Image (spheres, rainbow, N blue to C red):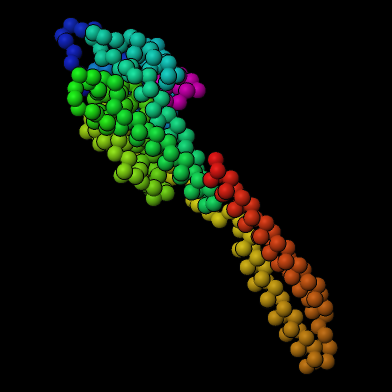
Amino acid sequence: MALSVPVNGLEDGDKEPLIELFVKAGSDGESIGNCPFSQRLFMILWLKGVVFSVTTVDLKRKPADLQNLAPGTHPPFITYNGEVKTDVNKIEEFLEEVLSPPKYLKLSPKHPESNTAGMDIFAKFSAFIKNSRPETNEALERGLLKTLQKLDEYLNSPLPDEIDENSMEDITVSTRKFLDGNEMTLADCNLLPKLHIVKVVAKKYRNFDIPKEMTGIWRYLTNAYSRDEFTNTCPGEKEIEIAYSDVAKRLTKPSSRKDQAFQFLKWGIETIVGFATGITNAFLLGSMPLSMRCSSADISLCLNDLATLAREDVYVGEDANRSTETASLE
């Protein structure tokens, strides 16, 4: 599906490059799908103010012409004057080089630290959301919070150009809108799509909210949600939730030993009751039924299994405690 993109600030007579962006389609095969890399390139082209077209690609029914255009390649990728480019990082560098001032905006951050701010958040989030072990959930959540705290501190720390050396006022908290200042840069195109996914998915599948005390992050997100360059390139929240429905793991018990023990216990009781019934019948009838002669062995096996499970359950519990303590230290 091709989408039209508005022309921003172009003069008559300007010759525009022919650019087509191919992004991942959503679950309906047409809308914008969940892909932070697709949104990253979408935002860059929009911020540049260049004319370009967007085609959503349904990965389940990839058209033959697209397979011939970029065989073995999944979105995002672009064609620039007919030349196919597939590496996201190289595409970003290429667009910043060829779509340069004075005709197009420069999007590279002025402060190198902006490029790396929040860079480890998505990895911590992925570990947190894919975990299925309750005993490690708390440690993984703390790891995510720690990386979010670092980003919050960066966003609240004034940049050098926010500080006026001649002013008597001491600025201690930044008021800037984005990572590198009041305008979006390449750093925001990289981080914002991922940060939005973290907010949506962690809430849906872990009931985790970015703490309101992290005022820098919330200021950052609020400003992003007010910009067309972000909101119009962003998949719907439902689409993001669908994309993670198979990725996000339910927190389950680390061991099913107790459930197994319960089943063995139930079986043992039934066996004992059956054995007792057989003995009663034997006394009443004067003979022991042949089918009951192995019941004592069944009982012995049942009791041995229960004892083994009880011992192993203790060891599993101790290992789980040690794992939690180790994760906490890390």
**Residue projecting furthest to the front:** 168
In the visual, does 16 lie left or right of 144?
A: left
Residue found at x 19% / y 25%? 168
Quadrant for the C terminus in the image: top right
Q: Quadrant of residue 182?
A: top left
Residue found at x 53% / y 48%? 136
Q: Quadrant of residue 62?
A: top left
Residue 30 seen in render? no
- Name the spot of residue 231 as percent of width and height, x first: 26, 33
Residue 105 seen in render? yes
Residue found at x 83% / y 92%? 286
Q: Is residue 71 magenta?
A: yes
Relative to 183, is 150 above or below?
Answer: below
- Name the spot of residue 175 as percent of width and height, x first: 24, 30
Name the one closer to the observer, 68 or 148.
Answer: 148
**Residue projecting furthest to the left:** 12
In the visual, does 303 lie left or right of 40?
A: right
In the visual, does 214 lie left or right of 302?
A: left
Q: Which residues are magenta?
A: 66-77
Quadrant for the N terminus in the image: top left
- The number of callouts visible is 0
Name the one closer to the observer, 11 or 177.
Answer: 177
In the visual, does 174 lie left or right of 29?
A: left
Residue found at x 26% / y 36%? 219
Q: Is residue 275 magenta?
A: no
- Name the spot of residue 285 as percent of width and height, x first: 80, 92
Name the one closer to the observer, 220 or 214.
Answer: 214
- Name the spot of residue 255 as percent of width and height, x first: 61, 56
Relative to 284, is 60 above or below?
Answer: above
